[in-house]
């Protein structure tokens, strides 16, 4: 059993969010789900809470009502193996009301912040040659979705 689990509280779209997230990731599944009794004002019949896995990591989600909102101080960081994975997740998470941010950050249609980051970014920013690492950093600072080819080009041309 996982010792620490991320718990995400939505106003009233947790079930939609859980189903959406599970559809995006490999090794993803819903482990359990419970619903509010019909008598609960504003939430009756809606999903109360769910436990789910994304890429083997467990999460919990809950519908908590209108006093729960998201902050940019919390994000889900996704390590991607290549540009295809970055592109797939970026476009899916930005769709239908999501919004791109800077340097690989975005907000999904539910308001949750994500960082969609390729492993190549860390490798290029951690280059032994400080000038090359700085060039990659400057290129990244101009991006919304991370473009590995552009980062590599900036690194190599420095």
Image (cartoon, grey):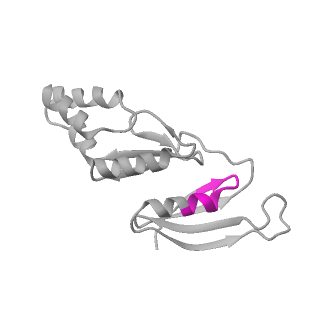
Above or below, comparing residue 30 to residue 122 in the picture: below
User: Which residues are the magenta region?
Assistant: 8-19
Query: Does the magenta segment cover residue 11?
Result: yes
Where residue 65 sits in the image (x, y, percent)? 74, 53
Seen from the viewer's position, the closer of residues 94 and 50 is: 94
Say which of 95 and 40 sits in front. Answer: 95
In this image, 152 relative to 17: left or right? left
* Residue depicted at x 35% and y 45%: 117
Q: Residue at x 40, y 34 (%)?
A: 144
> Residue 20 location, x and y as percent?
53, 59
For the point 42% across and 61% down, which residue is it?
25
> In the image as oriented, which residue stretches furthest toward the front?
96
Number of labelled discs? Answer: 0
Residue 107 in the figure: left or right of residue 102: right
Q: Magenta segment: does it hold 68?
A: no
Q: Give left or right: position of 62 versus 58.
A: right
Q: Is residue 6 above or below residue 132?
A: below
Seen from the viewer's position, the closer of residues 109 and 119 is: 109
Name the image quarter holding the C terminus. top left
Q: Is residue 42 above or below residue 150?
A: below
Q: Is residue 1 above or below residue 71?
A: below
As drawn, is 154 to the left or to the right of 80?
A: left
Q: Which residue corresponds to the image point at 85% horizontal and 60% vertical from the top-left? A: 41
Residue 29: x and y, percent? 48, 70
**Percent from the top left, x then y, of residue 114?**
47, 46
């Amino acid at each position: 059993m996982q010792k620490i689990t991320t718990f995400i509280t939505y106003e009233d779209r947790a079930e939609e969010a859980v189903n959406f997230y599970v559809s995006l990731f490999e090794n993803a599944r819903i482990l359990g789900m419970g619903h509010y009794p019909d008598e609960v004002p504003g939430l009756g019949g809606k999903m109360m809470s769910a436990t789910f896995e994304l890429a083997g990591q467990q999460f919990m989600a809950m519908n908590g009502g209108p006093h729960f909102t998201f902050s940019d101080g919390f994000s889900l960081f996704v390590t991607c193996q290549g540009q295809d994975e970055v592109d797939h997740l970026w476009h899916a998470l930005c769709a239908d009301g999501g919004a791109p941010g800077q340097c690989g950050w975005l907000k999904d249609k539910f308001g949750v912040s994500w960082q969609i980051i390729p492993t190549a970014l860390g490798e290029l920013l951690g280059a032994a040659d400080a000038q090359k690492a700085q060039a990659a950093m400057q290129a990244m600072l101009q991006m919304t979705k991370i473009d590995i080819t552009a980062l590599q080009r900036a690194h190599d041309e420095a």
